[in-house]
Amino acid sequence: MNQIYTSDLLSFQKRLAPTVDSDVVIDRPKTEILPEPYVITHERKIRFKLYYPNARKVEMWDYLKEYKLEKNGDYWCGEFDMGEGFIAIFLKVDGTSILSEFFPIGYGGNKAINYIDVPEQDHPIELLGENHGSVLSDFFESKITGQLERIMIYLPPEYMQNTEKKYPVLYLQHGHGENETCWVSQGKMNFIYDNLVHQRKAVPAIVVMANGMIYEESGDKRELKYRDMSAFVKEELIPYVENKYRTYGDKEHRAMAGLSMGSLQTSITAFEHSELFSYVGVFSGFVQDILTQNQSHLTEKNKESFRENNKLFFRGIGAEDRFIDFFKSDDEFLEKSKIKCERKIYKGDHEWKVWRRCLYDFAQLIFREDN
């Protein structure tokens, strides 16, 4: 007998389907015309059956390699071991890159992308309990970015029921080429937080996710101003959130973290404004600015203030990450600067599998009374 996983295109989580006969790909109502475009076997392989009846050629690859699909009647088929966790899927049909309706849709590389999420055996993210948090979109006009900004807000499970209680806030940033939705759609941060709260491993908190891809346009030029995130957080984001949601409104109940480029934005913000945050997390990323070599956030005055204000400085990265040498350079910098940190190396590369684990560990360390 063979187990398979099925998924709605709009859902973020695989669900283990009922066991079916090994000769049957999936048991579907007869009114359904097309079979599932993909299933995940108990061996964590992905079996594809994509309906492109008129295509002469269908190409598929992830970030690392191409996978050869074979035409079988109206379908393009194949079964591959593509690893576990978040897997970006790219398709070309007769030479044209497409965004497929057959897969969930996320965001990366400054565009919408398809993906598949293969449940990880050693770090499953399955919702526990019956009481879950909410994720909502909020909007405000920003003078710093010059446009209407959308932010994603995670509210803990009890937020709607206990209308008098205040909550700490984690400001959580994505990486380069991503946006404010990615920590939910790709990072599953709401599932991670729900489970930790259910297990009493984390303090219930509001989590705020904003778009860190801040651009300045001049004529025909468009420049990424990622360092402007520091002013955006201090002058606009925090005041907006604390004016609208039930927060404590003090440093002891604020944290900031981010992955990759978002980790650099976190470091810049936290060192320039250490009076704002007691807890800081840098996931697969940087204390020193490797992009422009502008280290103005790391003045002696800022470092001294950071040492005085910071309760927890968490840094994590994958052992196979291509930026591991920069991480080690930051080790030396922090030691020389006498700045303490909690440091963790995970199995993995520059990928969501690592960043989910970073959040899982970081969330258990922040806002605790024993800090």
Image (cartoon, grey):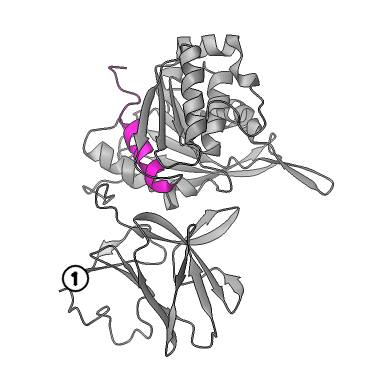
**Quarter of image, res 207:** top left
Q: Which residue is depicted at the point 34% across and 29% down? A: 165
- Residue lying furthest bottom in this view? 73
Question: Left or right of 157: which side holds 95?
Answer: right
- Residue lying furthest left in this view? 1
Magenta range is 351-371
Q: Which residue is depicted at the point 37% across and 26% down? A: 343
Quarter of the image with the C terminus in it: top left
Question: Left or right of 225: which side holds 48?
Answer: left
The three-letter amino acid code for the residue at tag 1 is Pro
Q: Which residue is depicted at the point 46% across and 15% down? A: 335
208 in relation to 11, above or below = above
Quarter of the image with the N terminus in it: bottom left
The residue beneath circle 1 is 18
**Quarter of image, res 310:** top left
Residue 223 visible, this orientation? yes
